[in-house]
Amino acid sequence: MEPAIWNQIKDAYTQAKAIPLAELDHFIRELPPEIEADVRALLAADRDAGAFIEQPYLIESGRFVPDVNDDLTGREIGEYRLIEKIGSGGMGTVYLAEHEGEGFSKRVALKFIKRGMDTSAVLKRFILERQILANLEHPNIARMLDGGSTGDGLPYFVMEYVEGEPITRYCDRHGLDARGRIELFIDVCSAVSYAHQKLVVHRDLKPSNILVTDNAEPKLLDFGIGKLLSPDRLSDSETVTATQFRVLTPEYASPEQIRGEPTTTATDVFSLGVVLYELLTGVRPFRNVSRSASYPITGEEPKKPSLAVLFDHQATSDAKATARGDNRLTGGESASPATQRSLPDPRTLRGDLDNIVLKALRNEPERRYRSVQELIEDLDRYLTGMPVKATADTMTYRVGKFVKRHRAGLAATAFAGFLLTGTTSVAVWQAVKADRERATADARSADIRRLANSLVFDVHDSIRDLPGSTPARREIVARALEYLDKLAKEGPKEMSLQLELATGLERVGDVQGNPLGPNLGETDAAITSYAKALDIRESIFDELSDDERYKTALLHSKLFRTFQIGGKWAEAEQHCTRATSILDGLTSSDRSNPLYSVTAARFHLELGDMRQTREPADFDSAVANYEAAISLCRSIVSTEEADTKGRDGMSLNDKIHDVLQMVYRRLGERYESQNDNARALAAFRDALTESEALLSSIGPQKAQVELVFAIALANVGRLEAVTGSGAKGLANVNRSIEILRKAASGDSKNYLAASQLGLAYWNSGTVHSIIDEPSAAMADFQRALNIQTALKKGNENDPYNLANLADTYASIAGVHEKAKRLSESRSAYQKSFDLWNSMKDAGTLPGYYAHKPRQLQDSIQRVAGI
């Protein structure tokens, strides 16, 4: 709920309480429509306000049962007729209802507060749930459709009616294997991650709140105990989420929920871990959980899922006793009998899946996945056969946990040992005191570290894609960095802390000036932050895992791109070379994987570009890097998983096609510059084949893919004309223009599409010149000139557009020269020369164009008769 709306509700509520009863109805009717229902609800709650202090304990203990005979079936509430009661929880009751209009009817789910539960505090919670749902629009979250209050002031809201069954039951009934269950679970995670981006924590994730329809579409329900993270909205005290009123499901609740501690997005990560464990094994990870929300945390470690499948089927009998609900809206969260299950093979769970699930279930929030998105990414890595981030607990960690669990016994043993060896009681006291002080300091450091990581990974990531959020992102990450930097200076040089500090610095750099994302345009500051992060990573490089080395290479690539955009070619090449070297080391290892190989191929492509861009250009090195990129891509063994789409909409094979189309284009351009037209045409045709495969896989919905295909068509068309197939070449160029014209007209702000359309017209003019159609050639060159001149007005210093514009002037000059219009030809050649020379003076002339100023100077002298 927005702060301004909530303030209006509170002000109106306060005024209403002071108004005589006879005038109250008139006062409420005059209120703005958006707050009237909520004010009525709060006023209706006054009659029971005093009961709140005692009632929640009775409710959560299971000793208070509201009036269950208050059945509203058959009644009409506003435009909805209640058909039957289909669900009942701690605070609310849900009815199947029907909304009838002119010529149509629609079934919905309508939720009320239970009679006997309509206290002021619970009403606030209900109103908050209604507001949360109103702000959530996601295909895997049940939508809120309407809301209001009954005649006696009881609020309700209307939801999308989900006809499905709990996710566990659905998977069992359809006999889904591990992959099928995980893919369905990832859709659920996407919904939870979306809620987190909206600053909402669900806090009651369980199978009965995740229904799956017959179309295999999971729907997340019941934000009744959800929590808003936004500081600008209702506080914990206002939303009734303090420990005095803990409504939760113990079997799926996180340890911090059970202890009544503040909850974060890590709470939902834990609950998702429980759901995933049950999906994969048929049992829950913790068997000693009572139905009471106050059960003690025993530190019980769950079995690995692979072992649970082997040995724990007998534990499902206790789940049968707690089965409840039907298959439409509520569905119990208990496991199905083992005989009805078709569980994954334990061998498919062993290793990576064990580690992923157990990481989500770690007792300490800071040791779980730092966000639901991280959990999604690890599951995606598993499904595509790539290394996952989750690893098994180390021996050091296990020993530490053992000491914590048996501190008293170990202390007694140690004390006896001291007596036997003559150690004094003073030494024992000093050791205990030191241990306590160290434990306190460690706990404080862990809290600060957890807060910093929450800021960097949870809060920052949740607002990253919101419009106008860049300044807030900088403040959030900078504050986290203060905490991490202080810990790094005061504490031991622990590698995990150093990596967290490096990650924080990298995030700051992203906000300041990552050229591939929203940023503040502070390029120099970004370079400083990236360099600090890189210093940390390089100082511990020899100790890093392959995955962390991979991240180090990606950080080098960010510096490479940042320097490149700033025209600092030497620094850019240095970082591109180092990134490529790191990836080459990973791909030559026995532990290499397809992701490393395709990324190494892309770095070789970019390094090749750097080598021919610098002055003097090193074309031999450029070609060698392009060929290395091709070799890496061709060495990747294609598997079934290689066609699985990732979160970016691209599969591994798509990324291979993308690298190859660019590498072949670069080789074609190089061969063409050497007048080796046969090899150039062969390379351009290879680029067309790869871009066509990319377009076929991804489809035209990604505009960038269509642009790549259009560029390839134009290059092939131009070289076909050069090698004697003019008509065929012209057809391909015209097809390219058609695609690019559509892209440019569909998005007037698409600079890239407009730039490529200008280049396509230049290609068309070149083909017309080759087949001796000067009038058509001049018309196309003029179209290219108009587009490129307009782009120059908007971006004076784009070297790519300036080079294209210079080429267009030279081509126009060539048509004039051939027609003996020497004055017009000299003028156009001069304009081309001026553009090339200005780039040379500015230091932005790429090495592969170093010959252009001299070439144009010769042309000017030729037409002048000098």
Image (cartoon, rainbow, N blue to C red):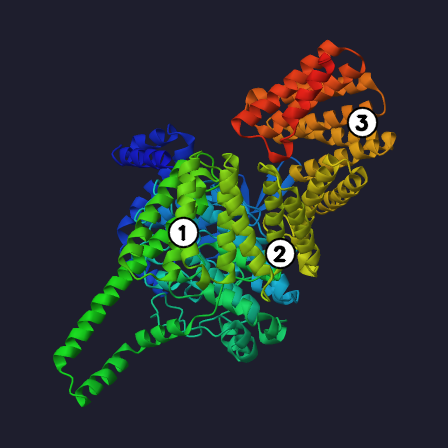
* Residue type for callout 3: Val
Residue indicated by mark 2: 597
Using the image as rendered, state which of residue 279 and residue 791 is in the foreground: 791
Q: CA distance from mark 3 to mark 1?
A: 52 Å
Q: CA distance from mark 1 to mark 2?
A: 25 Å
Q: Is residue 483 above or below residue 314?
A: above
Q: Residue furthest bottom?
A: 420
> Where does the image place residue 192, in percent across and percent down from the top left?
49, 52
Residue indicated by mark 3: 767
| Contact? badges 1 and 2 (CB < 8 Å) | no
Q: Residue furthest front?
A: 866
- SS label for mark 3: helix
* Residue type for callout 1: Asp
Residue 474 visible in rendering: yes
Residue indicated by mark 1: 535
* Residue type for callout 2: Ser
Q: Earlier in the sequence, mark 2 or mark 3?
A: 2
Q: Is residue 697 above or below residue 333?
A: above
> Where does the image place residue 172, in percent across and percent down from the top left?
62, 67
> Where does the image place residue 390, in percent across and percent down from the top left?
49, 64
Q: CA distance from mark 2 to mark 3?
A: 38 Å
From the viewer's perspective, tell me whether residue 659 is left or right of residue 226.
Answer: right
Q: Which mark is drawn over residue 776?
A: none
Residue 327 visible in rendering: no
